[in-house]
Amino acid sequence: MADTIFINYRREDSIGTAGRLHDRLAQTFGQKNIFMDVDSIPPGVDFVEDLNSQVAACDVVLVVIGPNWLDAKDETGKRRLDNADDFVVIEIAAALARNIPVIPVLLDRARIPKASELPSPIKALARRNAVEILSTQFGRDAEALIEKIREALNGGPAAPRPWRGKMAVGASAAAVLLLVGVSGYTFFRNLEEQRVQRAELKWEEERSAAQAEANRKVQQAEEQRLAAVKADQERQAQAAAEAAKRKTEETEQQRLAAVKADQERQARASAEAQANQKAFLAAIKEGNAAHSAGGFDKAIVNFSEAIRLRPDDASAFNSRGNAYESRGDHDQAIADYTQAVRLNPNYALAFNNRGIVYAHKGNYYRAIADYNEAIRLNPNYALAFCNRGIARQKINNGNDNDDKVKARQLDASVCR
């Protein structure tokens, strides 16, 4: 009876290497002597019953263990090894129960599981000697596995196949010698040796053809793998390019949106500024008209509105200071003139106006200090010279015509 080998593996863990291993073992032991999951089950047959019968009929079971074999999970997230209906567990348990040789095949540095990591029916798997196979040296490791399989099948190291033929030749020659005698031995011996040579030659041709076919399949599989890798790389590159394009488009859209928003913000700000300026000028105009007509309270209201609209405008504070001064509210007038020169330190008119208010309050020294600053800022300010001359006259109780003369030189209409 031919030796039967059962390959137990998990598809999501090691289907590629298991397939290569199947093809390699088929070359050595024959295609019909290798059983590999549902691909070997006839249509219409119950899976569990057929698997159990196949395991029971096999001589060796190979358990292919990849890096993810131990922790593989089903669609519910449960570990597959803990499922009582898992085919991998059923097959291994059936082999161990029948004391069939079980050889763990560790792929690419995978480790043999500990007994504590395995379900009860297959805990004995942890005590089986394993064979390692690396993808980078598959051919050499597969040959080593074949030798281990032969040892398991024969109960010891496998004898080279050609010697089996020679033992058969010896047995046949002895039978011929007994039947025909010594005289016919030489003829039959030569005939038998020729038959054996032809059989060995045919076997070698078949082996070479099988090896060539296996190499072709391996090369084809490698080409398919490389094509798949290239297609995946192209797909990833295309996806990356599309993602980069989308990101660029999104960035550009965001930039354009930001530009549009900024333009709209600037337009609103400009419109608000124009409206503010228009309202400010109207308030100043109304305040000046009210002040000229003697409506000082109304003028103060108008100038206060202008200050609310433009709190950094020194002229608005100066105008309101004039209105306060005209109403006789000297302290409020001084406060507004002070704010005016704070906003505009070069505002000669505000210094002069504050000096006038200080003079009205009798503080001529403060008044002269403001007139001096007004003259420093505007050396041709005739009214400041005139006012300073008047203040000096008040202090000296006499005449101080130098400033008045200078004032008339600058503007003949002042200090008359």
Image (spheres, rainbow, N blue to C red):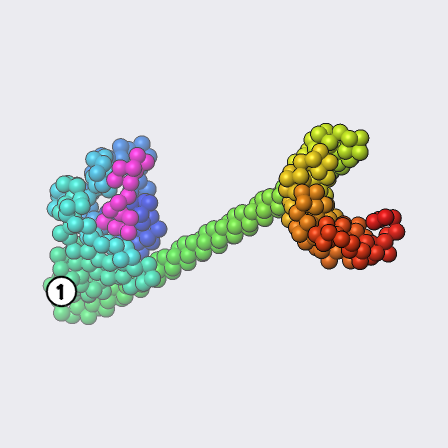
| Percent position of residue 268, x then y | 68, 37
Residue 145's quadrant in the figure?
bottom left
Mark 1 is on which residue type?
Ala
The residue under the point 26% across, 37% down is: 78
* Residue highlighted by disc 1: 174
Secondary structure at numbered mark 1: helix
Q: Main secondary structure of the magenta part?
A: loop
Residue 373's quadrant in the figure?
bottom right
> Looking at the image, which residue sits at the far right?
412
| Percent position of residue 332, x then y | 64, 38
40 or 375: which is nearer to us? 375
- Horizontal side, residue 107 vs residue 251: left or right: left
From which residue to which does the magenta span run? 63-80
The residue under the point 78% across, 54% down is: 399
Q: Is residue 77 magenta?
A: yes
Q: Does residue 70 lie above or below 220 as drawn? A: above
